[in-house]
Amino acid sequence: MIWKNNGPDGLAELESNPTIDLLILDHYVSESTGFDFLQRMKDRQIDVPVILLTSQREFHLAVEALRFGVEEYMLKEDAVGPLLTKTVLNVRERTRLRKQVQDQEKTDLLEKKRADAIHELVVTICHEFNNPLAAIKISTDILSRQWLSDGERQLIRDLDDSISVIEGEIQKLRDLTVK
């Protein structure tokens, strides 16, 4: 546990100490309010879960605390013994679960982007193979209408059979990437 008596020292500690995973903040910080402190945290992009303590039972303070993303809002008189401990544990668990969900969403997004890139590559490869194959098929069709020797006709049939095999493989590749 680290204790700071004023806002500037608290901010300096948060900026220099990345191991801080929870902040218990008094609404009345020596020279300002907890909301001023929270705004400075936000401006400096310090993302640490906060439990805000106050001695006032005012609804607008609770609403303002939620607007700043405070995890818990507690009256000082309630922040003693097991209730504060339970609150700290609950905030840490919620924060851990939220981070776990964010990490999984990030992983899922990367996997989707990877799958989309592979799909796009396969589509491009299939397209690049189909264009010359189509030209070869047209040429073999034109040649097969010409007068050819038996050996030449056999070469054209063999070429057509090979093209059919390649087209089949391209179709299998395309089928693998169907979404």
Image: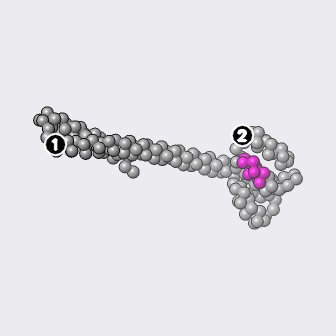
Q: Residue at x 40, y 44 (%)?
A: 124
Colour setup of the view: one colour
Taking depth in this image into account, of 174 and 59 the one nearest to the observer is 174
| In the image: residue 164, left or right of residue 123 | left
> Which residue of the protein is positioned furthest toward the left in this rendering?
150
| In the image: residue 153, left or right of residue 14 | left
**Which dot marks residue 146?**
1
3D distance between C-alphas at marks 2 and 1: 80 Å
**Which dot marks residue 5?**
none
**Total numbered labels placed on residues in the image:** 2
Q: The residue under label 1 is which amino acid type?
A: Gln
**Magenta stretch prevailing secondary structure:** helix
Taking depth in this image into account, of 23 and 123 the one nearest to the observer is 123
Q: Residue at x 39, y 51 (%)?
A: 179
The residue segment tinted magenta is: 38-46
Secondary structure of the residue carrying numbered label 2:
loop
- Dividing the image into 4 quarters, which one contains the N terminus? top right
| Residue 100 vertical placement versus 152 (above, below) | below
Q: Which residue is mark 2?
A: 18
Secondary structure of the residue carrying numbered label 1:
loop
Q: The residue under label 2 is which amino acid type?
A: Pro
Taking depth in this image into account, of 138 and 43 the one nearest to the observer is 138
